[in-house]
């Protein structure tokens, strides 16, 4: 009964490539989030979306963009991947009463 | 300033020991979540609490709303419990995360 699915577990990309990380949830949640997780820094919010076509910058949006064309899908885009974007990326969704929350399995991205 | 504080940061236990991880928060919350992350893995939600106590197998989570405090207990700990445990709260439509407790259970 997977609820939040990230398209890849592991990804290796070259510097300068455009990278798409996809997240899909099947719970009709309005709120979706992208975080990156780095040792010693914990989870940091990149972008979030509270509705289709709506997006808000988080704490570290530089170098990233997002797309939410459909309610169930929230995409994170690295316009031109750089080595400092090597990280674990986590997607999360939050239900309408702000209590039901689910996380994806994470995408470990390596930029070489 | 962290809205969510966890203790301890690191914990090593012998197999079979009773383990407690603590979480304090400073904001009004909709719910508190205990999350588990195995090395190199994604995050799994263990519990979602807005009051009282929940139990799942050897795991027990409690929350005291008045004191803004939650505990995660693991009874009869096992090496497979070795992971990072993260406390998170939802405030409005946002998450706030603790920095995690790294648990190692030695056989």
Image (spheres, grey):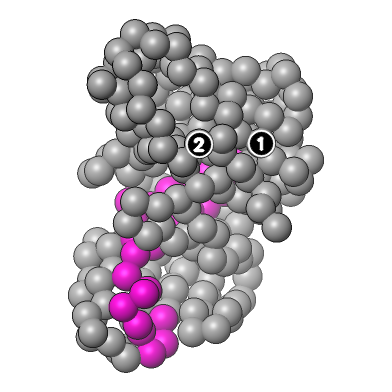
State the image coordinates of residue A79 (x, y, percent, origin top left): 44, 10
Q: Position of residue A78 (x, y in %)?
A: 44, 16
Query: At x 54% / y 66%, what residue is drawn?
Result: B46
Left or right: B98 as drawn, with respect to B92: left
As drawn, the label of residue A24 is 1
Question: According to the image, label 2 marks what residue?
Answer: A8
Mark 2 on the same chain as mark 1: yes
Which picture quadrant has residue A35?
top left
Binning the other alpha carbons within 10 Å of mark 2 as few (below 14), some (14 to 19) or many (20 upward) gives: some
Q: Is residue A79 left or right of residue A76?
A: left
Seen from the viewer's position, the closer of residues A92 and A60 is A92
Q: Quadrant of residue A110?
A: top left
Viewer-side residue, B37 vs B31:
B37
Q: Write the residue at 70% across / 58% down.
A: A1
Looking at the image, residue B40 sits to the left or right of residue B97; the answer is: left
The relative height of residue A89 versus residue B74 in the rendered view (above or below) is: above
What is the magenta range?
A: B74-100
Tell which subunit mark 1 falls on.
A
Identify the element where label 1 is drawn: strand
């Amino acid at each position: 009964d997977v609820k939040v699915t990230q398209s890849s577990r592991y990804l290796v990309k070259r510097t300068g490539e455009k990278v798409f990380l996809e997240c899909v949830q099947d719970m009709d949640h309005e709120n979706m989030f992208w975080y990156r997780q780095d040792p010693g820094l914990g989870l940091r919010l990149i972008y979030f979306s509270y509705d289709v076509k709506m997006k808000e910058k988080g704490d570290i949006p530089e170098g990233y963009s997002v797309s939410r064309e459909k309610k169930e899908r929230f995409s994170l885009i690295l316009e031109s991947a750089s080595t400092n974007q090597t990280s674990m990326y986590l997607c999360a969704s939050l239900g309408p009463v702000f209590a039901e929350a689910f996380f994806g399995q994470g995408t470990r991205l390596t930029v070489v | 300033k962290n809205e969510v504080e966890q203790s301890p940061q690191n914990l090593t236990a012998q197999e079979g020991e009773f383990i407690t991880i603590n979480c304090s928060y400073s904001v009004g919350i909709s719910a508190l979540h205990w999350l588990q992350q195995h090395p190199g893995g994604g995050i799994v939600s263990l519990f979602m609490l807005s009051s009282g106590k929940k139990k799942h197998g050897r795991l027990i989570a409690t929350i005291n709303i008045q004191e803004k405090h939650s505990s995660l207990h693991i009874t009869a700990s096992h090496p497979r419990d070795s992971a990072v445990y993260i406390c998170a709260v939802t405030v409005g439509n946002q998450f706030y995360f603790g920095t995690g407790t790294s648990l190692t259970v030695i056989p």
